[in-house]
Image (cartoon, helix red, strand yellow):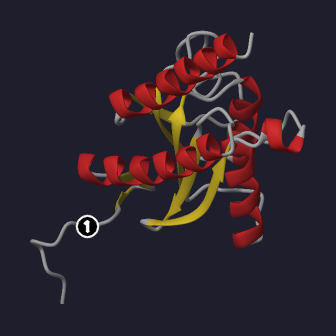
């Protein structure tokens, strides 16, 4: 028997996932937790989680400096983990939550993996391709588009980035 008062994790209507604002913020907090892992190893603090059926199935955080590999962005690592977990390159029943707007590389991976929903926190005014500089995720010329929602826990996501770069500038100033 279904308890109608219980908050439903995912409501599926005609193939569309609908998350409550509380759920979106909860998943973004999990992405922020991943971003903190990046910050702890002096990486740009960006974190991502992939959700399927209301549960986090994959996580990622930036590791470019650590790995010396340009492709180890949070989104790419989370997508790769989700692909391996469900044994499928198509992530058509998943949603991506990422603390910062995806770049061109990550947007390409999102489109190619067919993630239908992307939620991000802070906009990226220098490289964001999910609505700021351009919107590759909703580009009608591609064979797949993602619904994009920006600004989930925007202040927390923005502050994490701002404080990281402020601290980095301060450290560099003292090392001169």
The residue that appears at 60% across and 34% down in the rendered structure is: 145
Q: Circle 1 is placed at which residue position?
A: 8
Q: From this view, report whether residue 32 is shown above or below residue 137.
A: below
Q: From this view, report whether residue 82 is shown above or below residue 48.
A: below
Q: Is residue 172 left or right of residue 14?
A: right
Q: Is residue 117 visible?
A: yes
The residue that appears at 77% across and 29% down in the rendered structure is: 105
Q: Is residue 145 left or right of residue 176?
A: left
Q: Which of the image's four quarters has the N terminus?
A: bottom left
Quick one: 86 or 17, which is closer to the camera? Answer: 86
Q: Which residue sits furthest right?
A: 68
Q: Which residue sits furthest left?
A: 5
Q: Is residue 135 visible?
A: no
Q: Residue 172 in the image: x percent, y percent?
A: 69, 16
Q: Choose top left, top right, bottom left or bottom right for residue 11.
A: bottom left
Q: Residue 111 in the image: x percent, y percent?
A: 69, 37
Q: Is residue 71 left or right of residue 119?
A: right
The residue that appears at 62% across and 22% down in the rendered structure is: 168
Quick one: 121 or 118, which is closer to the camera? Answer: 121
The residue that appears at 14% across and 80% down in the rendered structure is: 3
């Amino acid at each position: 028997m279904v308890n109608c008062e219980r908050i439903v994790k995912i409501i599926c209507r005609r193939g569309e996932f609908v998350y409550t604002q509380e759920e979106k913020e909860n998943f973004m907090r999990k992405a922020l937790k991943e971003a903190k892992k990046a910050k702890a190893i002096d990486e740009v603090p960006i974190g991502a989680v992939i959700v399927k059926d209301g549960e986090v199935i994959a996580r990622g955080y930036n590791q470019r400096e650590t790995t010396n590999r340009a492709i180890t962005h949070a989104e790419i690592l989370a997508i790769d983990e989700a692909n391996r977990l469900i044994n499928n390159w198509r992530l058509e029943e998943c949603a991506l939550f990422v603390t910062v707007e995806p770049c061109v590389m990550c947007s390409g991976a999102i489109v190619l993996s067919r993630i239908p929903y992307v939620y991000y926190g802070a906009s990226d005014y220098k490289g964001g391709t999910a609505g700021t500089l351009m919107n590759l995720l909703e580009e009608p010329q591609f064979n797949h588009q993602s619904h994009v929602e920006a600004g989930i826990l925007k202040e927390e996501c923005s502050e994490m980035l701002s404080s990281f770069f402020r601290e980095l500038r301060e450290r560099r100033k003292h090392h001169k």
